[in-house]
Image (spheres, helix red, strand yellow):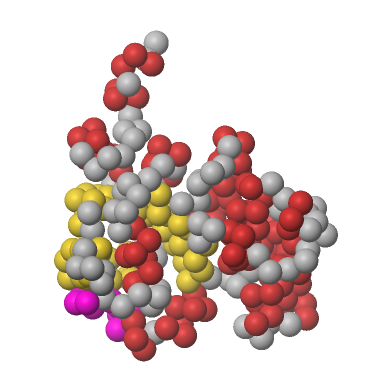
Amino acid sequence: MSELFRAEALEHLFPDGTIGLDHVSLAIDEGELILVAGKNGAGKSLLLRHFIGLSKPNAGTIYYRGEPIASQIPLIRREVGYVFQDTEAQIFGQTVEEDLAFGPANLGIQGKELEGAVRSALRDAHLEGMSERRPLTLSGGEKRRLAIAGVLAMKPRCVILDEPFANLDFPSVQEIIEVLKTLRSEGKTLILLTHEIEKVFSLASRLVILDRGKIVFDAPPSLAKKEDFLQSGLVCPYRECYPWQID
């Protein structure tokens, strides 16, 4: 696998002096499904904003495909899709199909290639048959999948999802998980930022836990111990953590 992102000794200070990221070093390879976990305020979203050039560090260096990020922003815009927690802010079209065509059209994709990109995004996000629906009529889970589809229509190699399960009911969570399985089977690099690790723990190839701006765990999920979760304010995904629920 080739390396996609690398952060070296990344530091971020907020204007009031609060530490947002504390000497973070992290590499992400293509094809990974990496789960970046931590309670609210741990630094998950801040870290990935640095990775795509939306924030600048006070110290440290970020690389994309081996080159400093400053020279790679146009490539990142083409190859990396970011699904924000606020999906409403990513929906622009009057219909689902119009919304999905918005991004690739802005990249200069036209004609049959544009039609194909829209069809592919509908399929991968499990939105077939909804192309004429108005986004306002969609459920919360369907809007989240539409936001994912809008990113997929631009054919990214990597997709970052910020709190993809936030405010969703159980059926909607299951729908998002099925979409993630589809994307993983296609070999896309997936980076999930969430504190709800129990929902997607079994899918991840790697788990990174942030706590107060520091990486406190970085390994395959199977190597994580009960204490790794509880000490960082996370829900433990193991049944052994809840013996009263075991038959």
Which stretch is magenta? 58-68
Kindly tell me whether residue 58 is visible in this rendering.
yes
Q: Nearer the viewer, residue 124 or 148?
A: 148
Left or right of 190 in this view: 20: left
Q: Position of residue 39 (x, y in %)?
A: 32, 47
Q: Which x, y percent locates residue 198?
A: 40, 37
Which residue shows up at 21% across the image and 63% down it?
18
- Is 235 in front, or is 20? 20
Q: Residue at x 23, y 58 (%)?
A: 213
Quadrant assignment for the C terminus:
top left
Q: For residue 169, what is the image quadrant?
A: top right
Q: Residue at x 33, y 29 (%)?
A: 238
Predominant secondary structure, magenta span: strand
- Vertical placement of residue 173 versus 242, above or below: below
**Does residue 186 appear in the picture of this structure?**
no
Residue 67 lies in the magenta stretch = yes
Relative to residue 163, is residue 43 drawn left or right? left
* Residue occupying the point 62% across, 83% down: 107
Does residue 53 sit above or below 27 in this rendering?
Answer: below
Whether the magenta-drawn stretch holds residue 27 is answered as no
Answer left or right for 74 relative to 51: right
Q: Quadrant of the N terminus?
A: bottom left
